[in-house]
Amino acid sequence: MVSSDPLTRSKAIQRRTGRTFHAATRFLPERARHPTYVLYAFFRSVDEVVDDPDPPSKSDRRGELERIRRVALGERSTDDPVLGAFQELRARHEIPEREVEEFISAMERDVDTARYDTYGDLEAYLRGSSVAVAYMMLSVMGSDDPGTRPPAKALGEAFQLTNFLRDVREDVRKYDRIYLPRSTLERHGVTEEEVRNLEFTPGFAGAMRELLRRTEELYREGVSGIEYLPVDCQFPVLLAAVLYAEHHRLIRDREYDVLSERPTLTIQRRVRVVLRTWWHWRRRNDPVSAFEAASALPSMDSTIDRTPEDRLLDLV
């Protein structure tokens, strides 16, 4: 059991830096909620090594990531409360060493890589930066059904891609990183210089539309596996999917311009999404149809039974 001080610290880190994920985490049962706080704090600790606004040398950052890797795998001790809590959690929940290795390797890639030529290159990065996270979450939720892994992979990729699409401006300005694949940008006539200069063009809008659609296919694939998760974890995972996908509504409302300003969910909007998702979940008790009814994604099924109450909730 993680002691209260590291747990309190981990929860505070998630509340401060991951407000969308925090909103969904609060609905997990305690047995999974507390480990999730620790997981998130560990991920942020590693992120901060590569996202330091005044970074040390590349070799120093690689050395720090190697130190964290060894601590996380129990190969050395630490007095860092977050890393110590993760070390304990990994052993207790039998998180595979491979997933820790994959995650750290992806962060090492961030030290050296700031561009991705193809979507396949980006997928290789996502294996560590988001899919490994999804697999670790399966461990803490107590899901041992092998059928949950492909949907978890898809949903992990979808969450990360939504972050990339939302954060183009921030990634360029703070870290000189562009996660949108060059091949996609070039297909729409967008140059790297235009993105670096935050120049919004019709071509950039077209690239965003394409990547949004691709991401939304992953959401649907991922949501299809929620029914195989432990019952007490199904609604929180559904809620996380609806909350992250809500950024797509903001992006479309801005006509795909994420370069002049970062789309951000307000507290009021997050609360409305929680209420809307809960309503559809209680009515349908089916993750797929509840997601279709509650999420910002264009509906796949025009025959879905929508009551006047449903349509009223769509307005909020």
Image: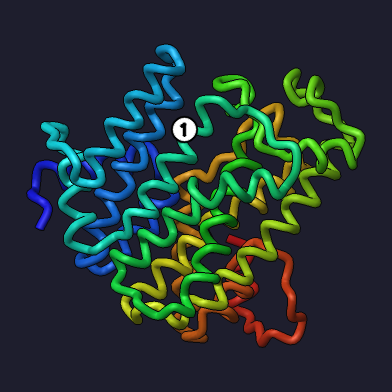
Which of 311 and 110 lies nearest the eye of the viewer?
110
150 relative to 82 in the view: left or right: right
Whether 70 is drawn above or below 32: the answer is above
Please identify the quadrant where the C terminus is shown. bottom right
92 relative to 121 in the view: left or right: left
Circle 1 SS class: helix
The residue at 55%/72% (across/down) is: 223
Whether 306 is drawn above or below 14: the answer is below
The residue at 44%/48% (across/down) is: 102
For the image, the number of numbered tags is 1
96 relative to 281 in the view: left or right: left
Whether 120 is drawn above or below 296: the answer is above
Which of 101 and 172 lies nearest the eye of the viewer?
101
Where is residue 154? Give x, y as percent: 57, 63
Please identify the quadrant where the N terminus is shown. bottom left
Where is residue 190? Give x, y as percent: 86, 32
Q: Residues within 10 Å of mark 1 (few under 14, many from 20)?
A: many
Residue 280, can we see it?
A: no
Which of 66 and 152 lies nearest the eye of the viewer?
66
Residue 121, can we see it?
A: yes
Residue topped by disc 1: 108
Where is residue 41? Give x, y as percent: 29, 42
Residue type at mark 1 is: Glu
The residue at 42%/20% (across/down) is: 52
Where is residue 155? Give x, y as percent: 54, 62
The residue at 51%/84% (across/down) is: 286
Which of 306 and 183 lies nearest the eye of the viewer?
183
Residue 62 found in image quarter:
top left
